[in-house]
Structures are given as C-alpha cells and as structure tokens.
Amino acid sequence: MDFHLITKKASIAPRTTRDITIPATPPPPTFLLLPSLAPTLPPLLPIDEWIVHNKQSPWAGRREGPPVELTDEQRQYAEAHAAKKAEKEARGEGKEKTEVVAKSTFHGKEEKDYQGRSWITPPKDAKATNERCYIPKRCVHEWVGHTKGVSAIRFFPKYGHLLLSASMDCKIKIWDVLESKTCMRTYMGHSKAVRDISFSSDGSKFLSAGYDRNIQYWDTETGQVISTFSTGKVPYVVKLNPDEDKQHILLAGMSDKKIVQWDMKSGQITQEYDQHLGAVNTITFVDNNRRFVTSSDDKSLRVWEFGIPVVIKYISEPHMHSMPSIAVHPNSNWLAAQSLDNQILIYSTKERFQLNKKKRFAGHIVAGYACQVSFSPDGRFVMSGDGEGSCWFWDWKSCRRFKTLKCHNGACIGCEWHPLETSKVATCGWDGVIKYCPHGADGGDSAAPAPSQAQEQAEKPGVERPETQAGYRGAPRVRHEAARGKRQQPPEGRATGGGRRRRGLHRPLPSKKHPGRRGEGDGRPPPWTAGSPNHRASAAWRRQGRGKPGR
C-alpha cells in the first residue's frame, strides 16, 4: 500500500477553561498518511512550481511544444474560412480599405478660352441683379448625371456661376449655371459615398469628405487631389477657416465625437476638440471667425474659441433634439438650427447664445432627415427642404410660411440660394436630381423681373404680402387700396348690413344700459357728448319737456 504525506496545521481554538494554559508557540504541523492517493496528487512542490509543471491546470500558460496536426474536419473548415475572407476582400467588404486612384474627367468644350482664361473664372460683369429677393415660382431646369442620391450642393463663392454637387455614387460633379447648364467636370477619388463638400474662399479649391474615412483636398480647375487626410474615422462635416490668412487650416467633425484640426501645409494634426458625446454634425463659424458652433448627435450645441479645446458655452435642454444643419443669418446676429422635431430654432450669436423664443419656423417634416436650412442673401426669407421632397419658404419677420414648392420625389436634402441672382434657388434630393428654380415664370432671363404694383404695395411697412393669403390656413386679409376699391358700394338709401356697419349706423341708441361709443375711425365725435349735435338736440327737447329724441 502506497502512502502520501499531507501537511495539516493544527488549529488553535480559544479556550475558556481556567485549568488549561494556552502554549506560547503553536504545535508543529502533523503529517497524515492517506492510502492510494499517490497517482492522482502531485508531489510535494511549491505552489508556483506546481502550476508551471501542471499542464492540465486552468492557470497554466500557453503550451510550449510541437504543433498539433489538424484533423481533416478542422482543415476543411480552415480552408473554407480563408476562401470566404479572400472573396470579401475582393469585393471590398474586408476591413482593409481598398486604394482608389483619384482621377478627373473634363466634359466641357475647352479648359481655356481664346484669351487664356480658365473655365472656372467668374464673368467680369457678374453683379447682383436685384437687392431684394423674391420667392421662386417653379422649377425650370434639372441637372441629371448622378446615378444615386445627391447629398450636398454648394454654389461657387461670391459669384455662383458654378454649382458643386456630391453624391452617394462616390462622385463629385461641377455644373455650369449661367450659360450651357451642363456638367463641366467629374471628380472621382472616393471609394464610398461622399458625405460633405466645402469650397475655399476663392473657389479655386474644395474639400470632400466620404464614408471611406478620407478627406480629400481638390484643385477645382485641374481635378487633381492636392492632399488626403484621415484619422481612421468617418468625417461627417469638413470646413476651412474663412479667414484669408487661415485658408490652410482644416476642421473636420468625426464620427468618434471629435473635431480634428489639421494644418494642411505640414499635414499634421494641430488640435483636437473632444467634448461632445456623439458624432459631430455641423461646424459653423461666428463672431468674425473667432469662434465656431458645433452640433452633435448628443442633442447639444457647443461653442468653442478657435484653437482652444475648451467649451465656452454649452447648450443642452431636455426638450432639444439633434440638429443636423445650421445656417448663419446674413447680418451675422442669428443662427438657424434645423431640429429633428420638425422645427427651425433661432439662436443669438452674441455672448450668451440665447434661444429666441419669439421666432420659430415649423410646418415641414424633417424627422430622420438631415435637411439643409438656408437664408436668402437679403435675410428676408428662410428656406428648408423636407422629407417629402418639398422646399419650404418662410418670412423672417413674421415667421409665416410663404410658399411650398414641390421639387423632388424623395427627400429634399440640400437647398442653396444663388448669391447674385437673388431670386433663384438650387435644390438636391435623394432621387439623384438637382433642380434650379427661378422667380420668373419663363425662367429664361437671368435678371429678376420688376415687381408689380401689388408687390410694391405689399412691401410697404405694416402691409401683408399677397403670398400670405394662400400660404397658410387663417392668413390675414390683404389690406391695400387696390383690393378695397373693387368692392361695390351699395346706394346711400339702401345700405346693407355691411354698409351700415361701415358708416356706424348699426350702433344702438345711447341709454343708461348702452352708453354712447365713439365711431370706428370716422373722425366724428361720439354721440351724446358735450358739443355734439345729438347733445344739443337732447338739451332742447328736455327744456320743452319732451324727453330724449327718438323715444
């Protein structure tokens, strides 16, 4: 019989008997002999050495030995998995991004004219045709060239003779607006859908952000990619600093809750703003470009000092929703934020960035869509797309809806007001079409039509515009002399109820129960007052003892 020694320390228990004395030192350990345990228990070794030598223990490290040969079933499974992974990488679905060679195609007649001017040079006689903006009447032109939905459009800065569009078909196109109204150049450099685009201040270059996690800096004229930036995350919005001396500074709102700032000259990241709790949707410069406002999926607005990654204003309320689009009023005093609870909210750009509770634009359906909001160049109108393919126009002062223009079959995502031809609007949607809507009925001339007499009368202070009559339910009655003069006045002797009401004949005779009231703007003194004809007649009748006249 085999025996195995196991050490067991004698337990010392407190004793309460006075006769027994507790020894000062514990007794030595005792050894127990147990039969037939030698094959199953390890030898007497320290605990660490026993763990290292025991390969069956769950605490043991990785086995060090010759590789074990796979069975036929395991080998077949490994080969099938490798083939499936190679097929995914061939289709571009693997984790490793596929490199796309950036290229561009020019579609115009010639890149330079007979004077050597480039095709992106703005016309010399380009200037504002009218100081006032008017609502477009209908869509007169369509640009069709994208095979999938268009996500963003941008007019050429200051002149608007070219229109840049980004689409979900991974392409960027630029269109001629003034003359031929055709596609001038196509930029192909992204492997996935393009999310956002942004021109430089002079329009000679532009930025593009795609879902392939790349930001590309393009030359507008030649179509070459100047540089590419990436952090490994999806950029949702890209913006250059509007200052002329800071056109080399790039800001990008990423899907990992950060705003990343690059110096495009060195290609290095110079700053990171990482206070948001969700993906960053918009970047808007305010206060002479010293500050910028960002919105995020965390349903908050944050104001930053440019170059300092510390929030100077944090706006978050329980009733707030995500704001995927923000526009600045032309007077730079207000921000219009498209809220996903189907309304447009107005915030001040002053120190406190307060919400203007008196201005609120609603009626459209934008829940779930990142529809763009925009202002007219004169600041009199607010424009926005909606999820049903319509373009909405509101009056800035009264917050009343002027017109709804049906533009697209799908959602109307983008809308831009022409910077010079102030009565023309471009819209884009998920149906892949870009539409151009002027104010004139024919849409052929570039100049805005002269306002009619009714429009001039409606533009006077205190007078409602004629569009409000059919623009919304319960619109006030149009008050101008042209409409009032068309009413047929009844004869003097046969006054109807309306005529009697206009001349004040409907008023009851004065008494203690119904005292006399002043006429409604007729300039006559109130009845039965001192000095009035009725008062003098009443006094004469009282002296004769006849009482009041008419009784």
Image: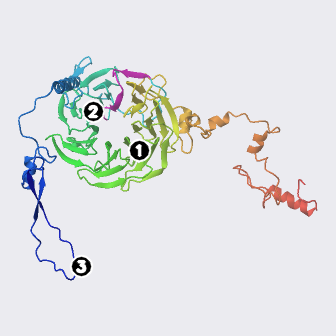
Q: CA distance from mark 1 to mark 3?
A: 85 Å
Of tags 1 and 3, which is closer to the observer?
A: 3
- Residue at image location 42% in from the left, 23% down from the top: 445
Of tags 2 and 3, which is closer to the observer?
A: 3
Element under disc 2: loop
Which x, y percent locates residue 317? Answer: 42, 52
From this view, report whether residue 24 is shown above or below residue 155.
below
User: Which residue sits furthest front?
Assistant: 1
Q: Nearer the viewer, residue 22 or 326?
A: 22
Label 3: which residue?
A: 16
Q: Earlier in the sequence, mark 1 or mark 3?
A: 3
Q: Nearer the viewer, residue 451 or 134?
A: 134
Element under disc 3: loop
Query: Can residue 102 be seen at all in this image of the molecule?
Result: no
From this view, report whether residue 500 is shown above or below residue 84.
below
Tell me: 160 left or right of 243: right
Which x, y percent locates residue 59? Answer: 15, 48
* Three-letter code, disc 2: Tyr
Which quarter of the rendering shows the C terminus?
A: bottom right
Q: Quadrant of residue 45?
A: bottom left
Label 2: which residue?
A: 211
Which x, y percent locates residue 361? Answer: 48, 42
Q: Nearer the viewer, residue 453 or 234?
A: 234
Tell me: 189 left or right of 361: left
- Residue at image location 15% in from the left, 40% down from the top: 267
Q: Quadrant of residue 368?
A: top left
Label 1: which residue?
A: 336
User: Which residue sits furthest top?
Assistant: 109
